[in-house]
Image (cartoon, coloured by chain):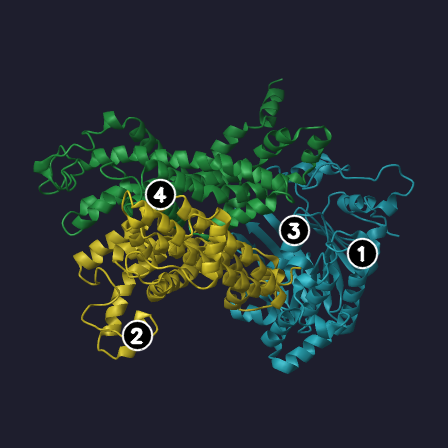
Chain colours: A cyan, B yellow, C green
């Protein structure tokens, strides 16, 4: 029984005819596992997780066969029951730490809010615990930072506070939505290290949304590659990196500078992600895929199990068993 | 915080002197001979004329006249009314509480209703209620309030007879002015029915005066709320599992209040201007009516220093709003 | 071949004017406002031919005649008559002339110096800027209507002085807006480029920078147009504006006050005309703002 089990999740903005932003997605995360979701901007990575958190607002519509988290179907939960889980067992940190904290309240207040809401801690006890949390996320001079306002903190510092807030109630699953994208390169590694540290220490599940494949290779146990709202390949690390099965995965890997050493130009995938009006009938990648055949244009492939995971392609690559 | 207040206080001083310059210039821009204008008669006897020029210091160079004026102000001498021979300052003091009472009632009406309407409209964006609030507030914003006052009088006072037409309280009651606020004084007087009567006198003027601020505050609250609800930190708050009420009020409204507060402050000036009209319509014995009557009677000392006092009042209120703004917004407070 | 032309068509950008009109026409309220304004402008332009009577002609035997559709109404006086037996409709139509004249004149009289002062304050942020801005702050310290009242109190009531007072009162808004916009634009690369190309200061001010600051100014101009109509009516109502018997809407209301118990139409109709005109202009202003400058959408 996995910690998180998403079956056939779709998210649309608008009526039933609207093009889904997330389209029939299956995903699972085990206890203590690090799963990375990679894909271009707009491929539906973040929306998937926001749907799980119940943070999709009208006109967004979420549908799924099930959104099992820790034995409860999040989709069937209403208001108060959902809020007992969200922020406690299921926590999330966002991309831009500078805007993710409320500018009008001190860091301490914002952390203590979680402690009060989910653990019932108040006053001195809450403050003591908040201080511990700040120290845990390696914020120097933590005591004085409790009374600091977000605008007085740097980006890296703010992200540490956001992490402290997320782990305050010791979640079973932490979702990190591009936690380092908005930060300086030097800070990125520190934040990733902190996240993985916490993940191991608390044996949390960690969903890492990113488009940085280098980070994925170093941290994740499994990867889900998304394209235009669909999972196109799911595989384990390092297998997926050594022998990608989906042409899109291959293209992503080729676009990493380190892989192109010696080549004069960085490999790129021509074209752009299909929009609302030019969505192909067949495989969504077909117009951009160098391997596309005639039936790729006509029919849409499904996600099929294969040697090292699952792939959504009629002609998967690297299928020879090694 | 103290240095923040000190900085703002420093900005007040030049503005204050600028306003004195303005009121000083105003009186010298009156077309015609100043003595004749003040005495209200033509061809004043030359000896008396020269004497008056001397007494008023009008034969000195302009800068000396201005220094005289500042000196007078510094001594707290605001001159005396040509009509009543009373000092401008004491007249102002007697009439001022009436205006404050009216303005506070109007702000209370506009602020409470405007905030609620704005927040609900933002939460129910695109709903019938939202469209209604926006439509009504646009109409309120475009309202000639002097006409609005007449309409209300026509309907509620003349038509239905619910509210009195003018004044602060019925002449039946003889209320001792203790605080100057009729609502409080009427309570203190212990006279039966006095408080209710004062309230009935207050209600229409307060609604009229509050109409434009109400429209502005409702619109501003709505748009500020809509903006804030899209912010990342509101998503963070929801991701913490906080209740919708806490998300909206603690995390949303608190930040939306910052621009609303600014607008609120700007409305105080407009409120005093509106008071001129409202007090005229409802014969409300406040400083607005006083000023207009003085203009009509060419009572120039009152006009000059009445305007000065009102300007100082606006400056002071804006200063207080600035401070409140700093309290509400830590980013401003810590600005160097 | 045909396919190629179709593609070319799609690549053609709409002209700015077309684009603006599409955005403006999308806003139903703005269209309604525009329509009402057109009617009002036509009324003002052709008042002598449209109005059934001379606005100051007194029909002594028909004093305070109610509107035509009420009992006692006369069809020749469609909206009734006032306390001196003058035709209300004719007076309202002629009043449109005055209100629009005051609005237009005061906007022009404050817009031009306002832009100039704003440009100077923006271009010389050390030398002249602070002085100008301080002066504007002082003018802003007095609520606009009060300042207008003060100015009229000194200059004396009347049409020209009303226009002057309102123009002076609306000056600070233009100065501040222009300055803020100029300061924002000055750091842009295209300004630096023009400087490097040796553009003279007047050229830099008027040709390079100013056109990029126009959107908020146009919006402000519509807003102050409606404010001018309101303030003029308020001054008229206080007896400090246009003097009777000139048919100014606010002045009409002032004299109608005494008949509040007997003749609701002399009170209601002039005010309604003011409200509708101001509302129409504000609706148009909203539409303009949304079409010209989406950034301002949330400003009041």
Q: Residues within 10 Å of mark 2 (few under 14, many from 20)?
A: some
Q: Which residue is mark 3?
A: A44
Determine the residue located farthest toward the bottom in the rendered image. A124
Real-space Cα distance between discs 1 and 4? Answer: 86 Å
C-beta proximity under 8 Å, tags 3 and 2: no
Q: Which residue is mark 1?
A: A215
Determine the residue located farthest toward the front in the rendered image. B47
Q: Is residue C263 visible?
A: yes
Chain ID at mark 3 = A
Q: Residues within 10 Å of mark 4 (few under 14, many from 20)?
A: few
Does B98 sit left or right of A94 as displayed? left
Residue B185 disc label: 2
**Vertical placement of B330 versus A281: above or below?**
below
The picture quadrant where one finds residue C82 is top left
Q: Which residue is mark 4?
A: B33
- At 44% from the left and 47% from the top, the residue drawn is B25
Place of residue B302 in the rendered image (x, y in percent of width and height, measured from the top left): 35, 56
Q: Nearer the viewer, residue C263 or A54?
A: C263
Chain ID at mark 4 = B
Does B70 sit left or right of A93 as displayed? left
């Amino acid at each position: 029984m996995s910690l998180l089990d998403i079956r056939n999740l779709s998210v649309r903005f608008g009526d039933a005819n609207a093009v889904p932003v997330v389209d029939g997605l299956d995903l699972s995360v085990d206890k203590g596992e690090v799963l990375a979701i990679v894909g271009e901007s707009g491929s539906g990575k973040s929306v998937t997780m926001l749907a799980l958190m119940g943070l999709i607002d009208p006109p967004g519509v979420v549908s799924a066969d099930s959104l099992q988290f820790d034995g409860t179907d999040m989709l069937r939960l209403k208001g108060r029951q959902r809020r007992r889980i969200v922020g406690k067992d299921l926590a999330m940190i966002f991309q831009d730490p500078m805007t993710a904290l409320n500018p009008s309240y001190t860091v301490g207040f914002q952390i203590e809010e979680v402690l009060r809401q989910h653990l019932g801690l108040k006053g001195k006890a809450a403050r003591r615990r908040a201080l511990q949390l700040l120290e845990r996320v390696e914020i120097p001079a933590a005591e004085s930072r409790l009374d600091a306002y977000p605008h007085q903190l740097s980006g890296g510092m703010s992200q540490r506070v956001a992490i402290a807030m997320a782990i305050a109630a010791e979640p079973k699953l932490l979702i990190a939505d591009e936690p380092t994208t908005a930060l300086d390169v030097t800070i990125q590694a520190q934040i990733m290290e902190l996240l993985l540290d916490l993940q191991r220490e608390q044996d949390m599940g960690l969903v890492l949304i990113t488009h940085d494949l280098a980070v994925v290779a170093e941290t994740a146990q499994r990867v889900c590659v998304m394209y235009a709202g669909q999972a196109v390949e799911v595989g384990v690390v390092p297998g997926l990196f050594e022998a990608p099965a989906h042409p899109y995965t291959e293209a992503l890997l080729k676009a990493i500078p380190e892989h192109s050493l010696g080549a004069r130009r960085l490999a790129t995938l021509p074209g752009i992600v299909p929009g609302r009006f030019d969505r192909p009938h067949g495989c969504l990648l077909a117009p951009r895929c160098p391997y596309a055949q005639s039936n790729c244009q006509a029919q849409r492939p499904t996600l099929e199990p294969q040697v090292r995971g699952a792939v959504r392609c009629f002609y998967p690559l690297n299928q020879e068993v090694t | 915080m103290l240095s923040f207040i000190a900085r703002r206080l420093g900005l007040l001083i030049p503005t204050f002197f600028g306003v004195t310059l303005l009121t000083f210039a105003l009186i010298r821009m009156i077309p015609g001979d100043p003595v004749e204008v003040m005495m209200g008669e033509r061809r004043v006897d030359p000896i008396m004329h020269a004497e008056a020029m001397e007494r008023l210091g009008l034969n000195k160079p302009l800068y000396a006249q201005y220094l005289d004026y500042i000196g007078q102000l510094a001594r707290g001498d605001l001159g005396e009314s040509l009509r009543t021979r009373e000092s401008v300052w004491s007249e102002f003091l007697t009439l001022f509480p009436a205006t404050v009472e009216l303005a506070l009632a109007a702000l209370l009406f506009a602020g409470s209703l405007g905030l609620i309407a704005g927040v609900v409209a933002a939460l129910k964006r695109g709903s019938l209620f939202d469209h209604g609030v926006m439509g009504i507030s646009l109409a309120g914003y475009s309202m000639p309030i002097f006409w609005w006052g007449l309409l209300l009088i026509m309907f509620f006072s003349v038509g239905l007879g619910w509210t009195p037409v003018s004044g602060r309280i019925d002449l039946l009651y003889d209320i001792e002015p203790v605080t100057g606020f009729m609502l409080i004084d009427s309570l203190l007087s212990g006279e039966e029915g006095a408080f209710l009567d004062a309230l009935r006198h207050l209600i229409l003027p307060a609604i009229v005066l509050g109409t434009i601020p109400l429209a502005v505050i409702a619109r501003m609250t709505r748009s500020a709320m809509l903006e804030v609800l899209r912010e990342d930190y509101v998503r963070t708050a929801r991701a913490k599992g906080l209740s919708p009420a806490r998300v909206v009020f603690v995390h949303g409204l608190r930040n939306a209040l910052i621009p609303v507060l600014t607008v609120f402050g700007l409305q105080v000036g407009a409120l005093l201007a509106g008071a001129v009209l409202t007090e005229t319509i409802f014969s409300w014995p406040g400083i607005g009516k006083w000023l207009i009557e003085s203009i009509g009677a060419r009572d120039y000392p009152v006009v000059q220093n009445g305007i000065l006092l009102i300007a100082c009042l606006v400056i002071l209120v804006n200063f207080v709003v600035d401070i409140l703004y700093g309290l509400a917004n830590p980013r401003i407070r810590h600005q160097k | 071949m045909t396919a190629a032309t179709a593609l070319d068509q799609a690549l053609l950008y709409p002209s700015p004017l077309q684009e603006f009109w599409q955005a403006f026409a999308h806003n139903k309220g703005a269209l309604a406002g525009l329509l009402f304004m057109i009617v009002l402008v036509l009324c003002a332009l052709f008042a002598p031919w449209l109005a059934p009577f001379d606005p100051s002609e007194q029909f002594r035997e028909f004093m305070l005649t109610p509107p035509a559709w009420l009992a006692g109404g006369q069809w020749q006086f469609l909206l009734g008559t006032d306390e001196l037996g003058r035709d209300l409709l004719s007076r309202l139509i002629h009043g449109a002339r005055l209100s629009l004249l005051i609005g237009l004149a005061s906007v022009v009289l404050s817009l031009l110096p306002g832009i100039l002062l704003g440009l100077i304050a923006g271009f010389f942020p050390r030398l002249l800027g602070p002085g100008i801005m301080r002066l504007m702050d002082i003018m802003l310290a007095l609520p606009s209507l009060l300042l207008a009242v003060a100015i009229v109190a000194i200059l004396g009531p009347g049409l020209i002085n009303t226009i002057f007072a309102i123009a002076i009162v609306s000056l600070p808004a233009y100065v501040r807006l222009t300055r803020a916009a100029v300061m924002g634009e000055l750091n842009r690369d295209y300004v630096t480029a023009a400087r490097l190309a040796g553009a003279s200061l007047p050229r830099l001010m008027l040709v390079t920078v100013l056109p990029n600051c126009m959107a908020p100014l146009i919006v402000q101009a519509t807003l102050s147009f409606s404010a001018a109509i309101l303030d003029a009516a308020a001054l008229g109502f206080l007896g400090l504006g246009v003097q009777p018997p000139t048919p100014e809407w606010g002045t009409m209301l002032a004299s109608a006050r005494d008949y509040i118990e007997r003749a609701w139409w002399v009170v209601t109709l002039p005010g309604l005309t003011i409200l509708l005109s101001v509302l129409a202009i504000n609706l148009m202003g909203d539409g303009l703002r949304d079409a010209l400058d989406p950034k301002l959408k949330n400003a009041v």
